[in-house]
């Protein structure tokens, strides 16, 4: 197999849909601090709460969701935007994802024009709106395969230091994107409740391992990256073409049973410690919406530069994404007392050691074929400061340093009843900030052994 050759970059740039001055006739989309202004327009799969209706595709605008199939049925979309939605009436975005950038750009432009202030057919479009508070969500896509990467060098170094103080970062890390095959069947949308997992673990004072409820349950603050266009088996995707095979980004909490993981991960890596639950936010923010927040990709001085199949002028110019990601926690006591989630940490996706295009190019360089709707996890996103750890494993230094919460409670790892929420938003002068909605999950007591 020959190494894929880079071709000149052909990525979307800033256009009229990004104009910070754009306003929508949906008033909530113009409110300061909304995740979903008209400059965003992320996609999801939804239906009315409690109904037996088929799930269908929608787009977020303010506190509303636009029923895309209703727009198509009413003849309110241009032909190219209507064609982009073909096949999405099966309750997934896979067909849209597989059509590539041109299709989603056509749909994005049609939505921007129809939802902006002064649009000629506002009255007709208004009939396709539903309040987000009145709908429920499914996963955005039928995920055939899920790969979780380890793209944050700060997370890898901190965790490595806990287990290998003299050699925290293994020698291959700065050369090759590290990943493992995750479990797609246990992915769930935001709002998921799951029991504390059982697993085999062996404590330092145990004569033999035991099957018991996880004692060191953790979250992992990640982003999920959805694959768009497929590549054929045996045909690697060149780095310059990688983003043409990506659709968009969502929030991902890859819950982890740390005590189970410590016992099982050698020699093959995570298994039951990761496969019991992973939570996704329902909204997928497209790469087009994120275009104003791209940033140069650089490596620290003295670090090796990526091998040629992972390098291109476009990656260096705009491979990173300036995106703030946060973890918020609400305990049972806080909930009982009417207290909201409290922020534990924040870091920036720009700090990641590998870009989204590098992850995809590496994933396919051996000929691996990816399908529309496949999911790649970024791995835990941690910043350079100790307070920016993307997991409790880091923030509590492996359980040695409890976190004190604002209400006086302490945490080293998660308790039953704890609710963890991920949030993310962008910031850049001259552009409207966009967000991802909430990605929330709650821990229930373990089932009996």
Image (cartoon, rainbow, N blue to C red):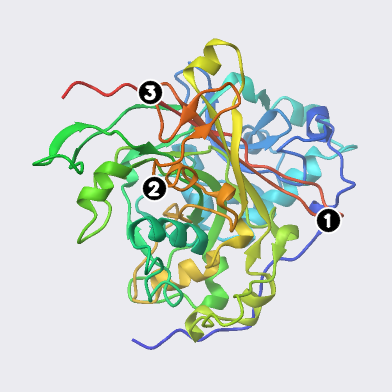
On the image, the x and y values in percent for residue 297 come to 64, 72
Pointer 2 with pointer 1, Cβ within 8 A: no
On the image, the x and y values in percent for residue 315 come to 62, 74
Is residue 1 at all visible to an observer of this figure? yes
Q: Picture quarter containing residue 40?
A: top right
As drawn, is 246 to the left or to the right of 269? right
| Secondary structure state at the residue bearing disc 1 | helix
Give the alpha-carbon distance from disc 2 to disc 1, as whole Å. 32 Å
Q: Reading the chain from its start, which is encountered first: label 2 or label 1?
A: 1
Is residue 55 at all visible to an observer of this figure? no
Residue at the spot of label 2 = 143
Q: Picture quarter containing residue 124?
A: top right
| Secondary structure state at the residue bearing disc 3 | loop
User: Considering only vertical position in the picture, is 302 above or below 320?
Assistant: below
Numbered badge on residue 416:
3
Around disc 3, counting alpha carbons within 10 Å, would you say few (fewer than 14), some (14 to 19), or many (20 or more)? some
The quadrant in which the N terminus is found is bottom left
| Secondary structure state at the residue bearing disc 2 | loop
Q: Nearer the viewer, residue 49 or 124?
A: 49
Around disc 1, counting alpha carbons within 10 Å, would you say few (fewer than 14), some (14 to 19), or many (20 or more)? few
Residue at the spot of label 1 = 16
């Amino acid at each position: 197999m020959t190494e894929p050759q880079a071709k000149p970059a052909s990525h979307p740039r800033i256009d009229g849909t990004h104009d910070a001055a754009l306003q929508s006739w949906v008033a909530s989309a113009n409110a300061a601090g909304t995740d979903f202004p008209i400059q965003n327009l992320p996609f999801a799969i939804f239906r009315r709460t409690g109904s037996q209706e088929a799930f269908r595709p929608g787009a977020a605008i303010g506190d509303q969701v636009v029923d895309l199939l209703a727009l198509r049925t009413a003849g309110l979309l241009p032909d190219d935007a209507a064609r982009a939605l073909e096949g999405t009436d099966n309750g997934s975005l896979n067909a849209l994802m597989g059509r590539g950038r041109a299709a989603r750009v056509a749909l994005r432009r049609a939505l921007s024009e129809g939802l902006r202030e002064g649009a000629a057919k506002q009255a007709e479009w208004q009939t396709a709106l539903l309040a987000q508070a009145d709908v429920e969500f499914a996963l955005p896509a039928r995920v055939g395969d899920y790969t979780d990467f380890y793209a944050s060098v700060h997370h890898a170094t901190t965790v490595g230091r806990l287990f290998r103080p003299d050699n925290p970062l293994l020698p291959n890390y700065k050369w090759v994107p590290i990943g493992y095959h995750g479990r797609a069947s246990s992915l769930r949308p935001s709002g998921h409740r799951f029991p504390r997992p059982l697993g085999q673990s062996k404590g330092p004072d145990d004569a033999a391992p035991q099957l018991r409820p996880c004692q060191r349950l953790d979250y992992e603050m990640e982003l999920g990256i959805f694959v768009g266009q497929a590549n054929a088996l045996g045909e690697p995707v060149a780095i310059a073409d990688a983003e043409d095979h990506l659709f968009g980004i969502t929030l991902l909490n890859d819950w982890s049973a740390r005590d189970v993981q410590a016992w099982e991960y050698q020699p093959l890596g995570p298994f039951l410690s990761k496969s019991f639950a992973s939570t996704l936010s329902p909204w997928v923010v497209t790469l087009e919406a994120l275009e104003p927040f791209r940033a140069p990709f650089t490596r620290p001085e003295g670090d090796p530069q990526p091998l040629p199949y992972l390098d291109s002028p476009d990656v260096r110019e705009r491979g990173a994404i300036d995106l703030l990601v946060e973890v918020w926690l609400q305990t049972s006591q806080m909930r009982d007392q009417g207290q909201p989630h409290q922020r534990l940490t924040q870091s920036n996706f720009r700090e990641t050691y590998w870009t989204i295009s590098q992850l995809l190019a590496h994933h396919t360089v051996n000929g691996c074929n990816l399908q529309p709707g496949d999911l790649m996890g970024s791995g835990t996103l941690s910043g350079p400061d100790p307070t920016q750890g993307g997991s409790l494993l880091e923030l509590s230094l492996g359980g040695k340093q409890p976190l004190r919460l604002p209400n006086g409670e302490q945490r080293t790892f998660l308790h039953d009843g704890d609710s963890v929420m991920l949030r993310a938003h962008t910031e850049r002068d001259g552009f409207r900030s966009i967000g991802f909605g909430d990605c929330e999950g709650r821990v229930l007591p373990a089932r009996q052994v």
